[in-house]
Image (spheres, helix red, strand yellow):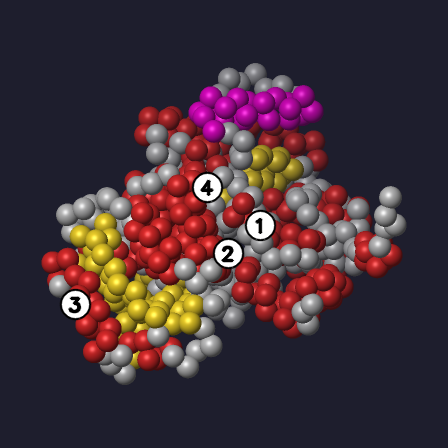
Amino acid sequence: MQPINEEIMDTFSNMRKLPRGIQSFEKIRKEGCVYVDKTDLIWHLANDNVYKFLSRPRRFGKSLLTSTLKCYFEGKRELFDGLKISSIEKNWTKHYVFMFDFSGCTTPKEFYNYLDGRIREYEKELGKSDKVELKDRFFDVMKAAYERTGETVAVLVDEYDAPLHSTMLKDDEHENMAEIYRSFFPIFKTGADYLKCLFLTGITKFTQLSLFSVLNNVAIISAEPMYASICGITRQEIADNFMPELETMAKKNNWTVEQTLEELKSAYDGYHFSNDLSQEVYNPYSLIEALSTCRISNYWVSSGDTKMLTDMLIHGYNANEEFEGYLLDADMLELADVSRNNVPLLLYQSGYLTIKGYDDGIYTLGFPNREVKKALYNAVLPNVLSKESEEVDKSINRIRMALRKDDIEGVMKNLKSLISETPYARKGEKSLEERFRFIMKNIFYLCGCNIEEEHQVAGGIIDLVAQYKNVVLVFELKLDTNGGVKAARKQIDDNHYADAYLADDRQTYSIAVSFNTKTRSIEDYDIKKH
């Protein structure tokens, strides 16, 4: 048996406990986990408007935020010792808290049964109602809690929209699900006298529900600058709270601490949730996982079900739509309802796009970081090619291996196989040549290449440049109806497209590609080594 490495033992013995997968504020505090203190913002949130809604992507800390609010409303002062809120809150009034989590409800029956079960639990403690309807029974337990304590109650609903997401593309089921919301949520207006706070979290906002039409004074705080960083972790918070973990990660990867911060930034940073672009946050789930394992990986993407995203792309995605630099009206982003036809808004609310700019009521959206950009391309490409994800993944891996071996013929053979019989463009999509360029760009990005599209050089504009670790590929793309591979080769050579990369240490290849408009496939290609 080999002796245990003493250096490894020292590392583990000195490691602090990070809140990996822990969504309970009480557990984090009692177990001594590292906690990023946002309790000053939480105090303002708790004591602001009665009705509040916050949308954030999955695994962004919504459940922990809700749990923290629960402990605050319950007056558990000891859990907040030493935190910012302890210097703000003086009274620590105890309120009865009703807690709901809709994340496990996927059918109308499950949703109804969940609400019924939760109300039954509260009835056991506060007294059984003689009413039948869910809303009437819940009104009675709210009133009973108020009369027992003499204080208004708090109602916290985590992942309020999960049941609606699960039925979004099933019209009848979705309407039945929505009807349960319409019949239940108006009780919060009827019972307003007993309410201290109604706080809801979710990924998306469904405006057609009574939640937002009857409760017309709900404060939608999702895009308010004040709360932009209430979920997620800023760079300063990383430096202030995780320096030991940064130093350990740096040591294990032979990086400096500054290099470690840059690697984390590239992978997980870049989220903005308001028009104040100075407030930028990291994905907290991926960040904590990376600091815990000392490894950069696609943690957030692999941690959840992306079926709804895939289904939405199939139903409403324009196969040439460019999401980097997508423009969206402020009212649309801040107030509009998500729908199967508004894929960019869904992608923003789901965390695949974020705010990159704001000017005169117009938001510019784009990818926050490379983790989600790769994830989205992974979801988009099978849909565009009308091929199974497993088949696309295998082809991408073969192309990547050929790139590593400087086997450009192998790259093109696998590319030709993958881009075969691509579906016809839908109405409103761009030209076929642009469509093929879009597909090739996605493929090479997923292979790990840096991509330049329509790159301006002295001789003209190069369609596509894919730069890998050891090679640079310069592409000119033509349809068979526009001169084909001969015209593409002539344009490359006449305009000296490859010359811009000859000083690079990597091997440069120029590749003329012709697409057949009838078979919707790569018809021919010509590779030239420079």
Q: Tell me, yes or no, whether the highlighted magenta stretch contains residue 122.
A: yes
How crowded is the residue under tag 4: few (<14 C-alpha within 10 Å), some, or many (20+)? Answer: some
- As measured in the structure, the alpha-carbon distance from the residue carrying label 2 to the one carrying label 1 is 9 Å
User: Which residue does the numbered mark 1 point to in the structure image?
Assistant: 299
User: Which residue does the numbered mark 4 point to in the structure image?
Assistant: 306
Q: Residue at x 35, y 51 (%)?
A: 414
- As measured in the structure, the alpha-carbon distance from the residue carrying label 4 to the one carrying label 3 is 42 Å
Query: How many numbered marks have been drawn onto this rendered protein structure?
Result: 4
Quarter-wise, where is residue 437 in the image?
Answer: bottom left
Mark sitting earlier along the chain (2/1): 1
SS at circle 2? helix
SS at circle 4? loop
Mark sitting earlier along the chain (4/1): 1
Expressed as whole percent of the image width and height from the top left, the position of residue 23 reads: 66, 44
User: Which residue does the numbered mark 2 point to in the structure image?
Assistant: 371
- As measured in the structure, the alpha-carbon distance from the residue carrying label 1 to the one carrying label 3 is 45 Å
Where are the magenta residues, as a range? 106-126
Left or right: where does residue 55 sit relative to residue 194? Answer: left
Q: Is residue 350 above or below residue 191?
A: below
Circles 2 and 1, Cβ within 8 Å, touching? The answer is yes
Mark sitting earlier along the chain (4/3): 4
Q: Residue at x 64, y 26 (%)?
A: 122
- As measured in the structure, the alpha-carbon distance from the residue carrying label 3 to the one carrying label 2 is 37 Å
Quadrant where the N terminus sits is top right
- As measured in the structure, the alpha-carbon distance from the residue carrying label 4 to the one carrying label 2 is 14 Å
User: Which residue does the numbered mark 3 point to in the structure image?
Assistant: 487
